[in-house]
Amino acid sequence: MPNIILQREPLKFGLGGWAIDSMTQILQELDFTGQTGIEVEVLTRPGAPDEMITQMASGAQAGNSPYDVIDFEDELAVTGSRAGWYMGLDDLLPSDFWDDWTEGALGVTDVWDRYDGELFRIHHNFEACYWWARKDWFDAKGIALPTTWEEAAALGDAFTDADAGVWATEDGLVSGGFLNVYLAVITMQAGGNPFEVGDEFRTALEYVNDLMKSKTLNPASLQKDYDQQNADYLADRVAFMRQWPFFYDLAHGAEDWYEEGKAVVILPPAGPAGAKNSTYAAGWGWGIPKNTKRGDEAKELVKWLVDKQNAAKMVDYSVWYLGARNSVLEAANGEGVAEYLQMYSDAGVIGTRPFDENFVQASSILEESASAYLTDQISLDDAVDQARSRMERL
Amino acid sequence: MTTTTTTTRTAVARRDRLVNWNKVALYAALFVFLFVVLSPFFWIVKSSVSGPDELFKVPPVYLPHVTMENYRALADQVPLYEYVRNSLVYSVSSALLSVSVSFMAAYAFARISVPGRNLLLWLFVLTMALPEIATIIPLYRLLAEMKMLDSLIGLVIVMSSVLVPFTVWVLVAFIQQVPYEIEEAAIIDGANLFQIFRRIMIPLTSPALATMLVINFINAWNNLLYPLAFSVSPKSKTLSVAITEVFQARSPWGRPWNMVSALGVAMVIPAIILVLFSQKAIVRGLTRGAIK
């Protein structure tokens, strides 16, 4: 039974703009205020981590907080937890709380949502990188969908027509966060963590370079972001690609273009480490800034949001609340992106996102070295040595 | 005689050709300049009326199928009316407050002779060297203490305080160019300080005041950091903050450049209108002092 708390001002709840409508509806229709007496003002937080960090940092440093509860991403999780911005959440949760979570989600929680043993964020979604393929193209050519690195690398010959701007595969690899995501996935497929700059990182770089040299991966990917990559896919210029779940909405929204078979999800092509942990899920989660003046009410809200019944109902309102909890997956009933999450979870291909204590700086180091190598400015040895020595100095 | 006439004609023809070439070079330079200045603006306007599928086409689409869908989607995503209203209140108030305060401070610096006046003015101006980000935390504390976080009044006070040093610096030079004898004559005729301001100083320095009003308005209008750091709700957020809030589909991935462009156009229009209407005053203010 939640505590009934009387208050004057509404609790400030900061979410990305894409989640405002659904959360407003959830709070109203599931009657949070009626159950707890707590009024909530749903506010739009800046969408990108840099701007959110600017906003949060000034408040935190001044002993204040712009929000009482926030929804936040991995970048803010690392920065904020190390800076001591967030309140511990362990005492909010019932003892059987984690029994509802899948193994993959528990692994992510341990790495990304705990600091010094204390839980500071509770994931509400679990967004894996998926591989989307033009099954109609593969069928027309009588080629099997790729299941391994080697099969994927061989597709350049079958699909790439550089003069026509058509490529077997393409990615959004522009430096500044995009390339780092890809490096992490490919290094995981090689069996390692890119931030350790081991042999697996070298193998991953070499493979990406081979994909470009064999005209399988469009080299212009290094100048593209996800929007450009998606636009190319929707312009019939890409046979298969890695992309986040938001492509599902884009593809289905392109009414003139969309047909069954144009964007089917396949399992990631397995690298030397095998299929297990061959992609990762990024995620957002709820947290409470330590400097909020409304800690008790904020805890009530978070408790309510992560409650098993409420979390399962929330997925009906938006795929944004599609977390890797058994109750949530059951409620999603395999519809839309849930089907792919279930497929990837069942295949055990979702691993934990590679982590580093200095995530943002470390990501920049890897991107700079990889970018220099992939654009033929330095050798593979130099790229690995450079990344390793800079990581050691970090 | 004939030789002299022919020589003169040749010289005139040469001069005409030179003048023509100078004109060609001038127009070519002007064309290049206009191209450099206007092409980003053309691109942003074009993107604002393009569908998302036309943004990244290769080869690029220079004349898209015009759609106002981006503006409609933008209005659905962010409370556009509130943000425009807040931006106007924030920018107009900051410009008026900063110029009013600066005018009086500049008058004091220009007219009142106290030891260390120049040093004081330089110290004042030196505050401009402080990066905005370095002042955020103390300003946040200050506004929190004054219960002015997430309020337009707080934002206006902060922005005005940032604009004042440069405005004072500019206005001091203008006020110093107004001969003090005019004020002395007015004082002999019985004018008080308020009347001197109203009847003499403001009219004589109006080009500078107008220029600073426009410059300060544009600075406040474009300012992102303070509204981003000090505002969280639509009651005080401005249009510049809206750029950090527009999104694509139902997730944080990707940037909706078509909507960001639409917002860019919406932001730049008031500034263009203001500059067009106050063009004469700005040119006067930038090219001459009050009187000589």
Image (spheres, rainbow, N blue to C red):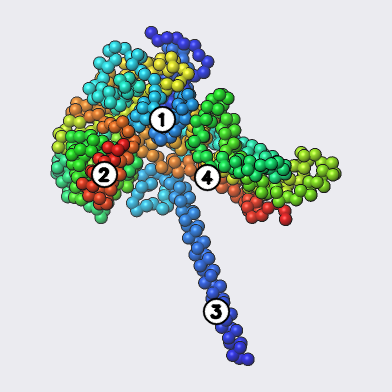
- Asked if B224 appears above or below A3 in the picture, the reply is below
Q: Look at the numbered discs 3 and 1 and tell me whether their residues touch, using CB distance below 8 Å.
A: no
- Asked if B171 appears above or below A97 in the picture, the reply is below
Classify residue A368 by image quadrant. Answer: top left
Q: Position of residue A336 (x, y in %)?
A: 28, 29
Element marked by disc 1:
loop
**Residue on which the image places disc 4:** B268
Name the foreground residue: A312 vs A295: A295
Q: Position of residue B259 (x, y in %)?
A: 43, 40
CA gap, disc 4 and disc 2 = 44 Å
Q: Position of residue B271 (x, y in %)?
A: 56, 45
**Residue on which the image places disc 3:** B14
- Asked if B14 appears above or below B244 in the picture, the reply is below
Element marked by disc 2:
helix
Q: Is residue A227 visible?
A: yes
Left or right position of B224 against A260: right
Q: Mark 2 and mark 3, same subunit? A: no
